Image: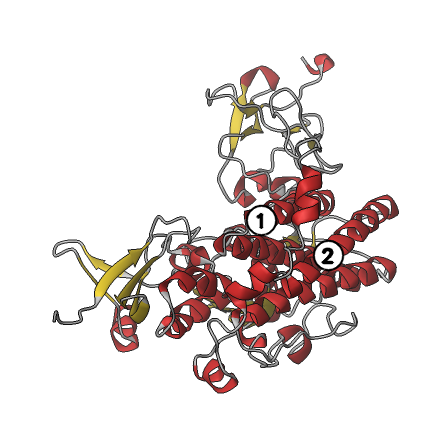
Amino acid sequence: MSLPRLLKEAAENLFKKPATLPFPKEDIPPAPGYRGLHRVDASKCISCGLCAIDCPTKAIEMRVYSEYGNKRYPVVHYYRCVFCYQCVISCPKKAYVITETRPPPIGDKERLIGEPIFKKEEK
Amino acid sequence: MSQVRTVEIPIGPQHPALHEPLQLKLKVDGEVVVDVFLVPGFNHRGVEWLAERRSFIHCLYMCSRVCGICNTIHGTTYALAVEDLAKIEVPPRAKWLRVLVNELERIHSHMIILAIIAELIGFDTLFMLLMRDRERVMYLKELVTGNRVLADYIAIGGVKRDINQEKADIIKKHLNYIEERMKYYKKVFAEDPIVRRRLVDVGKIPYSRAIDLCLVGPTARGSGISCDIRKLDPYDAYDEVPFNEIVYKECDSWARVMVRVDETLESINMVRYVLDHLPSGPIGPKVIPRRFPAGEGIGRSEAPRGELLYHIIHDGKGMNPYRLKIRTPSFTNIHNGIKILVGQHIADVPAIFGSYDPCISCSERVTVVDVKTERTYTMRLKDLSKMKR
């Protein structure tokens, strides 16, 4: 009986660094173009609500902002979001600001939201 | 002398040999399996029912979640069905990009089942090495689509994002490494004594039996049946991308494994060809289609596990489809393929079952549970037609 083919490679791997990483200390940065946290740019948003209609998990809420002229702006609830980016594509004004940040491990639903980005001069 | 009796042994729904919730009830006489019963229903989510209550765009994302591993091909086939319904023309570049992502998915899907088969036959070193190298394919998928597993790359009428030359170079660089490794694993699967002793001449499905059992995909191609939908009924850009259909005539578990190894190598060449010959142009329609005409549409494709079919009916009213029927390859492969287990040794059951590449979440369709009497029964088509709205 011949020896298993993998024996040489298995022996070599004993003296190599593990392929897995100690996660919280070391991390692999996501690939370029990773679908991360996204928020709407309020200066471009026209409050049409198409992103909220197209969202498959109903993660986008059209919230009224009384301090910014009583207009509705989309708020992304990340705990429901599946990061499919349908909202980014549906947006007729390309108002979504996309990042490559992974959602943080927070249990609090109220802190895991993406509110619209308002510029200071709009106040 | 005591009378010979059969013993019933349950495998699953939580079992180290089967990685997904499914129960196999084996009747054994000594070490030999006499009869097999399949108990599905642990992962039933009612996807077809949900699809009738969601808009066409929502359905695209839900259909991608029918199966975790082959999610892009589910999205593609749903899009093919909707495009057939609404007669939407897909731009050439989008067609080629769909081929690119679906072939990347085929590579990682075949690598995971090869790893799982290695684990099922007790070869954990091979499992670890295959899973380590598969991680590179996952990175490539993240690079192209934006996510490792759930790509959500397909849109109705095209794809969502484009690739540039920089990304193409990274993909080619990693593919060289994966090809070199897969050629090495091919030698391991073809020559290693441990693999050969557990797989060769085990779970034989002769040509005629495979046709009787309606097997599809690599499981059937291991029995010498030519059934690759990419060749027989080309969709997307498969009529323009050259590739060979892999057919083995050994009919055993080993042949089914080798079909997957060779298909992985073939897919690597296809990805290279797509990257070199990608046509220019738009990648999708300018306006997202939201309303669809009444009618029917069919999408048919070759998933990593076999032929996948979506049938969609729309009555023209509202935003949601009237009916969506999904026929997954694992459904026939699991439900019919278990008949092969009769007459085999009980120690070979996981390896044979693993060589079908079973995907339980794909194959959970109709189970009826009477809550009052706690009785589970299957329904005939006649009874189902009475229940329709």
Say left or right for B30 vs B288: left
| Residue B72 in the image, given as x and y percentages of width and height | 61, 55
Q: Which residue is mark 1?
A: B127
Residue B18: % across, % down? 42, 54
Labelled disc at residue A78: none
Considering the image in quadrants, where does the C terminus of chain B appear?
bottom left
Label 2 sits on what residue type? Tyr
Residue at the outermost front position:
A1
The residue at the point 49 percent across, 41 percent down is: A57
Task: Say which amino acid is labelled 1.
Answer: Phe
Give how far across and how far down residue B245 sits, in percent. Answer: 69, 75
Query: Picture coordinates of residue A15 (x, y %)?
Result: 70, 33
Secondary structure beneath label 1: helix
The residue carrying mark 2 is B184
| Quarter assignment of residue A42 | top right
In percent of the image, x 66 and y 59: which residue is there? B188
Q: Specify few, some or many for label 2: CA neighbours under 10 Å numbering under 14, 14-19, or 20 or more.
A: some
> Left or right: A19 with respect to B10?
right
